[in-house]
Amino acid sequence: MATKTKSNEIRIIRIYDAPVKMVWEAWTDPEKVSKWWGPRGFTLTHHSKDLRPGGHWHYTMHGPDGVDYPNKTFYHEVEEYAKLVYDHGGNDEQAPLFRVTALFSETQGKTKLDMTMTLATPEAAEETRKFIKKAGGNSTWDRLAEYLTKESCGEEQFVINRTFEAPLDFMFEVFIDPARLSQWSPPTGFTMEFIRADIRPGGSSFYLMTNGKDIKMYGRCEYLAIEKPDHIQYTQQFCDENEKVTRHPMAPTWPETMLTTIKLSEEEPGLTRVTLTWKPYGKTTAEEVETFVKGRAGMTQGWTGSFDKMEEYLEKVSAK
């Protein structure tokens, strides 16, 4: 869900742990942008780029289903390391879909990307919101975070963001209260039961997820940091019923231990953005890291399903 400002605008805010110059170049260098631009599963072929007011960027997006999407971006404003204004979604046969204003600024050594998409009417904006959600368009900005991390420190990670209509303090409880966690975090079609829940720094939990038929998955978490109201970090492992560490039941080369970091931030009163980062933790093999990298599409699907259930849970709670 993107943050709503004016009724005909869609606003997206991201904080990247990288200098402004590095983020700007990731956006504007054709070789670099081709490594992350577009929803997860898409690839890009660059044709030409003239980065100046009145210039064009010509490229083709290739969907995972084999469909090609020709694009010609038209630049209105270019302020190096600070601002881009351009028309997006058009080509030689189609008018642009909307105008983008992307602002880049330094904040505590990191980069804030504040992007607004302006459409002709509120109705067009609402349809675009639905299309972006259905196509997984917001994963574009998650892929940028993954690319920047790989470039700056060589680490592979998975990132997913989502904005929820709930206050910051309540969202923090949704992530640390076992009764609330079990309502939304298991995969679609599964239920979750905490056998032990000691959710505090230095504490741990042991849980069971089951489809109620033939699949039972045990796991445990060890909590490294819990800082109210905006930071949670824990490791996670698959286990057997006796809490002995095992491997992923359907992916034997999946990393044994994963590190989850959750950052919460208030976008505006009543709206909280969740940034979840997932990466292998501890000693890993090249094969395990490769399995992790190739599994990002599945991770997106899994976490999207959980976040969809979180939205449903929040709607039920707010209706009471």
Image: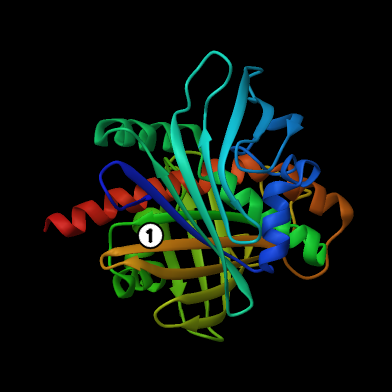
Asked if one can make out residue 229 in the rendered structure from this viewpoint, the answer is: yes
Q: Residues within 10 Å of mark 1 (few under 14, many from 20)?
A: some
Instruction: Say left or right for 168 vs 149.
Output: left
Residue positioned 66% across, 58% down in the render: 80
Residue lying furthest left? 320
> Is 79 or 184 nearer to us in this picture?
79
Residue plotted at (76% across, 41% down): 30
State whether residue 245 appears in this view.
Answer: no
Residue 220, quarter of picture: bottom right
To which residue does mark 1 refer?
182
Work out which quarter of the rendered image holds the C terminus and state it. bottom left
* Coordinates of residue 66 in the picture (x, y in percent): 66, 17
Find residue 269 and report its horizontal and vertical position in percent.
Answer: 26, 68
Residue at the far front in the pictured view: 54
Q: Position of residue 21 (x, y in %)?
A: 71, 64
Left or right, 54 with reference to 100: right
For mark 1, give the secondary structure.
helix
Disc 1 marks which amino acid? Answer: Ser
For the point 51% across and 62% down, the residue is 275
User: Does 175 sit above or below residue 140?
Assistant: below
